[in-house]
């Protein structure tokens, strides 16, 4: 299969590039073409003529998006629209990556693919509008939402915790009033490989690891698995004020996988253990 990956130098893009080598790949990033440049996007897609475009390129720094709304809009909304239009023109299937931030984070249960979006941040708003652009301009599109993502080389929460532990930060205060699904790029990639075999699936699909944790519980498991004598101290979100508010509930429910009788995502603890087995230094 001919597959184009945008944002290939990012954390998920690198994992996809490494684990999809059995396909004919074009792993593209900003030096290849700028997704905000519609003619450049159209030319790149036309020349490679992919069967599938996995669109990972995005402005994902949540606080930077909050303080630089124009840039976030240009990349996450207009850039995605450009990719979607080029896919529609070439006949390629679009798999566009998205996020739990498209939801408000105020629910008392995990969000399914059928729940109404309602972001509270610029990042979430622009990603939601990017989802809408993907669906509007490319009928053959799938939106893959992930959350609390980590992968080889980072940057991620896993790598931040390892760095702070190495620096001897004490006490290690970690937020304990936000809950979500820690999810590895390897688990996401394995399920995207499955979804490549199901062209009938369109629309939103959630790919987060099973089970849930707070950030503090996530940190404790990281330290346990790498054998560090470090105990995180629970604290509230209010102790770490940020330009963009963080959702209290980032849990996603993978309803579409169940509906199509596809294997479930691994439990987050198992995925994290396998991550450190393959990447002992992160």
Image (cartoon, helix red, strand yellow):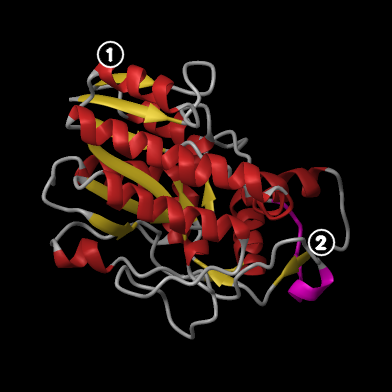
- What numbered label is drawn on residue 172? 2
Q: Position of residue 46 (x, y in %)?
A: 26, 19
Q: Nearer the viewer, residue 241 or 141?
A: 141
The mark nearer the N terminus, 1 or 2, is 1
State the separation of the CA atoms marked 1 and 2: 51 Å
State how many labels appear: 2
Left/right placement of residue 193 relative to residue 180 reads left
| Bounds of the magenta segment | 228-239
Q: Nearer the viewer, residue 12 or 87?
A: 87
- What numbered label is drawn on residue 47? 1
33 is higher (above) or lower (below) than 260: above
The residue depicted at 30 percent of the width and 22 percent of the height is 45
* Image quadrant where residue 3 sits: top left
* Residue mark closest to the camera, 1 vs 2: 1
The residue depicted at 49 percent of the width and 82 percent of the height is 107
Q: Position of residue 173 (x, y in %)?
A: 80, 66
Badge 1: few (under 14), some or many (20 or more) residues near its Cα, within 10 Å? few
The residue depicted at 64 percent of the width and 46 percent of the height is 70
60 is higher (above) or lower (below) than 175: above
Q: Position of residue 76 (x, y in %)?
A: 51, 45
Left/right placement of residue 9 relative to residue 90 reads right
Look at the image and tell me whether residue 276 can be seen.
no
- What numbered label is drawn on residue 101? none
Q: Position of residue 41 (x, y in %)?
A: 39, 24
The residue depicted at 42 percent of the width and 28 percent of the height is 38
Q: Nearer the viewer, residue 115 or 170?
A: 115
* Image quadrant where residue 255 sits: bottom left
Look at the image and tell me whether residue 132 can be seen.
yes
117 is higher (above) or lower (below) than 52: below
Q: Nearer the viewer, residue 8 or 70?
A: 70
């Amino acid at each position: 299969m001919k597959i184009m990956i945008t944002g290939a130098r990012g954390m998920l893009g690198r994992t996809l590039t490494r684990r999809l080598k059995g396909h004919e790949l074009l792993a593209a990033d900003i030096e290849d073409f700028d997704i905000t440049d519609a003619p450049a996007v159209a030319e790149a897609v036309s020349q490679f003529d992919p069967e599938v475009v996995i669109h990972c390129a995005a402005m994902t720094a949540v606080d930077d998006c909050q303080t630089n709304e124009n840039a976030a809009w240009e990349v996450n909304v207009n850039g995605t629209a450009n990719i979607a239009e080029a896919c529609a023109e070439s006949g390629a299937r679009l798999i566009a990556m998205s996020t739990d931030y498209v939801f408000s984070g105020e629910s008392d249960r995990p969000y399914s693919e059928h729940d109404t979006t309602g972001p509270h941040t610029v990042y979430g708003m622009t990603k939601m509008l990017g989802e809408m652009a993907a669906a509007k301009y490319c009928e053959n599109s799938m939106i893959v939402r992930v959350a609390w993502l980590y992968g080889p080389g980072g940057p991620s929460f896993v790598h931040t915790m390892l760095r702070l532990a190495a620096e001897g930060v004490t006490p290690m205060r970690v937020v304990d009033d936000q809950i979500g699904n820690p999810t590895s790029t390897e688990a996401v990639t394995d399920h995207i490989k499955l979804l490549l075999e199901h062209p009938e699936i369109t629309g939103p699909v959630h790919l987060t690891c099973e089970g849930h944790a707070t950030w503090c519980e996530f940190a404790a498991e990281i330290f346990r698995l790498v054998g560090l004598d470090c105990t995180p101290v629970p604290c509230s979100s209010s102790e770490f004020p940020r330009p963009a508010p963080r959702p209290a509930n980032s849990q996603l429910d993978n309803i579409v996988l169940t509906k199509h009788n596809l294997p479930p995502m691994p439990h987050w603890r198992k995925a994290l253990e396998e991550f450190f087995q393959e990447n002992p230094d992160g």
